[in-house]
Amino acid sequence: MSGHGLGLFVAGLFAAVLRATAPILLASLGGLVSERAGVINVALEGLMLTAAFFGVLGSAFAPVWLPGLAPWLHPFVGAASGLAASVAMALLLAFIHLECRADLIVAGIGINLLAAGVTVFTMVAVTGDKGSTAGLASRALPAVHVPGLADWPMLDAFVNGDNRIGHHLLIYVALAAVGAVGWLRWRTRFGLRLRAVGENLEASRSAGIDVRRMQYAALALSGLLAGLGGLYLSMGYLTLFQSDMTAGRGFLALAAVFLGARRPLGTAGAALLFGAASVLAGQLGLLDVPTQVVYMIPPIATLAAMTLFGLRRQRRAPPS
């Protein structure tokens, strides 16, 4: 393979890893925000699924709801619908845990099951199909193309993707969200209070911080970020919704939070690792490799990474 061909291959691989990483990264940042407030969001999978479905539904029915709206705005109506549904589901989790005193982990699992049931039930009611929304005319959110790079094919392939139409809008949102969450955490009063609540509830109450309000806000923001990850699956990665299309990405995102030492950059690195593992699984799927082995790669990568992280942390811990 020539140097030019190798460069294009690497650019294509880079684009594939970005596509696989984006939904995991967005959801993991949502999990990071809620975890810093002392509420571990086990419902990331369900929040992604909810946003993915209602995003497609909103995009498909935007011409009916808003007949005078320009067609190019229809996917953004869908995105708003998906995010609103995801945040509403996150607030339901907050209410069940904070007001009804339900166990957070059990409530999170319940939200995941609720999302799986609601999306399939509504999909059957609207389309008559329990597998996908292929019958709905939904639209995708746009890609962002950087012009003027045609004379540099390799650079064009890296910046605009292997298809040269540009990386999806939500990929740039995911990358920007890493910096935004870091800024929110370290440079704002909200972030300071968020970390205080996560470190010590009673001390935060004594300092006059409304702990419950902060945890509501953290879970709502977690729902927003996880919802963006779900939108990417149904309005970018694909242009339709399929039942259970998140395929465990929400749980990978939750693992990325802890593997990344509960820091934005570390979480992004862990999400990138899981995205690369997903791409590897996809490439092996094209070869004569049993599908069972292919499906095992992302969870095996997760377990191996968490084990190495635990061993490393144990070595660094001071002797008792």
Image: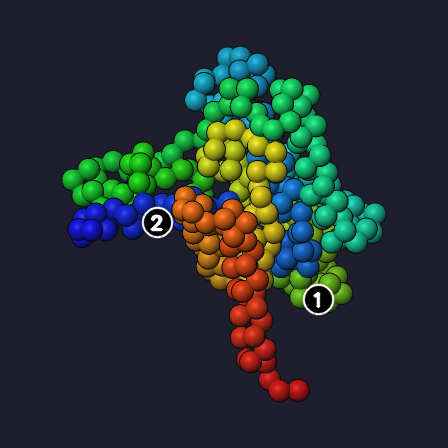
Residue at (57% x, 41% y) in the render: 246
Under mark 1, the amino acid is Asn
Quadrant assignment, res 33: bottom right
Pointer 2: what residue? 14
- State whether residue 122 appears in this view: yes
Q: Classify 10 Å Cα crowding around label 1: few (below 14), some (14-19), many (20 and above).
A: few
Give the image location of residue 107, x and y in percent: 76, 48
Classify residue 4 as left or right of residue 28: left
For residue 25, say whether it is visible: no
- Quarter of the image with the C terminus in it: bottom right
Residue 17 shown left or right of residue 138 in the figure:
left
- Depicted 210 relative to depicted 174: above or below: below
Say whether residue 198 is left or right of residue 187.
Answer: right
Residue 253 in percent (x, y) is at 56, 52
Q: Residue furthest right?
A: 100
Quickly name the residue at label 1. 200
Mark 1 residue element: loop
Q: Residue at the location (29% across, 36% down)?
A: 164
- Residue visible at 55% across and 19% down in the picture: 135
Residue positioned 69% across, 43% down in the render: 112
297 versus 286 height, above or below: below
Q: Is residue 115 above or below residue 283?
A: above
Place of residue 174 in the rendered image (x, y in percent of width and height, measured from the top left): 46, 46
Query: Is 304 or 284 nearer to us in this picture?
Result: 284
Foreground: disc 1 or disc 2: 2
Q: Amino acid at mark 2?
A: Phe
Classed neighbour count for the residue bearing mark 2: other residues with Cα under 10 Å, few (<14), some (14–19), many (≥20):
some
**In front: 193, or 10?**
10
